[in-house]
Amino acid sequence: MHKIAVVGNGGSGKSVLARKLGEITQILVYHLDALYWKPGWTPTPREEWCQLQAELVKRDRWIIDGMYARTLEIRANAADTIVYLDFPSWLSTYRVIKRGISFRGRTRPDMGKGCPEKVNWEFLKFVWNFRKNKRPGVLATLNGLSGKEVIILRSPKDVNEFLARLR
């Protein structure tokens, strides 16, 4: 494992898992949210966003966390390992709400500067409907890969067991 993509729904724990993987493997972690969002929740323009990821994946070793389904193939094609957090909708939604309360008015460590935590109905609906709307495409992308290690973790227990095996 030298090039690891961590993907999943909002609130599934991608950033936390990526940080823990970075500690275990001593590989530098890149949080896509911190790279995509400019101060004031301004998104990076699409062409620049694709170019930034194309440059990141050229590096010898990396852990990149973030879903960004439109650019998943960039990371998935370059990764040797893809970890997909395939958690129930209720758990991811609960975690998003909890995170919103915990970081209210402050910027998370894995978020771009000047982007204080916010939770709105649109994002909650996206998270709740992720399994129905986005999961089929994610699984199709992952199933279409060859020569990659694809690890699907379906619960926090699976995550803990995975990390224990790596240690």
Image (cartoon, rainbow, N blue to C red):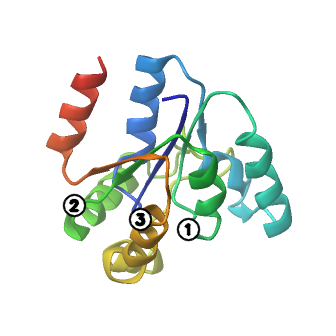
Does label 3 or label 1 sit earlier along the sequence? 1
**Placement of 26 over or under 118, stated as above or below:** above
**Looking at the image, do the residues carrying marks 3 and 2 touch, with CB atoms under 8 Å apart?**
no
Q: Secondary structure at mark 1?
A: helix
Number of residues whose C-alpha sits closer than 10 Å to that of mark 1, classed few (under 14), some (14–19) or many (20 or more): some
Q: Nearer the viewer, mark 3 or mark 1?
A: 3
Judging by the rendered image, the residue that carries numbered circle 2 is 91
Quadrant for residue 3, please give it. Answer: top right
Number of residues whose C-alpha sits closer than 10 Å to that of mark 2, classed few (under 14), some (14–19) or many (20 or more): some
Position of residue 107 measured from the top left corner of the image (x, y, whole percent):
56, 45
**Placement of 52 over or under 67, stated as above or below:** above
Front-most of residues 33 and 130: 130
| Left or right of 134 in this view: 105 | right
Dot 2 amino acid type: Leu
Judging by the rendered image, the residue that carries numbered circle 3 is 143
**Looking at the image, do the residues carrying marks 1 and 2 touch, with CB atoms under 8 Å apart?**
no
Q: CA distance from mark 3 to mark 2?
A: 24 Å
Front-most of residues 133 and 34: 133
Does label 1 or label 2 sit earlier along the sequence? 1
Q: CA distance from mark 1 to mark 2?
A: 20 Å
Quadrant for residue 44, please give it. Answer: bottom right
**Placement of 66 over or under 110, stated as above or below:** below
| Left or right of 3 in this view: 50 | right
Q: Nearer the viewer, mark 3 or mark 2?
A: 3
Judging by the rendered image, the residue that carries numbered circle 1 is 69
| Left or right of 162 in this view: 133 | right
Q: CA distance from mark 3 to mark 1?
A: 15 Å
For this orientation, the residue located farthest to the left is 157
Q: Secondary structure at mark 3?
A: helix
Position of residue 150 measured from the top left corner of the image (x, y, whole percent):
39, 49
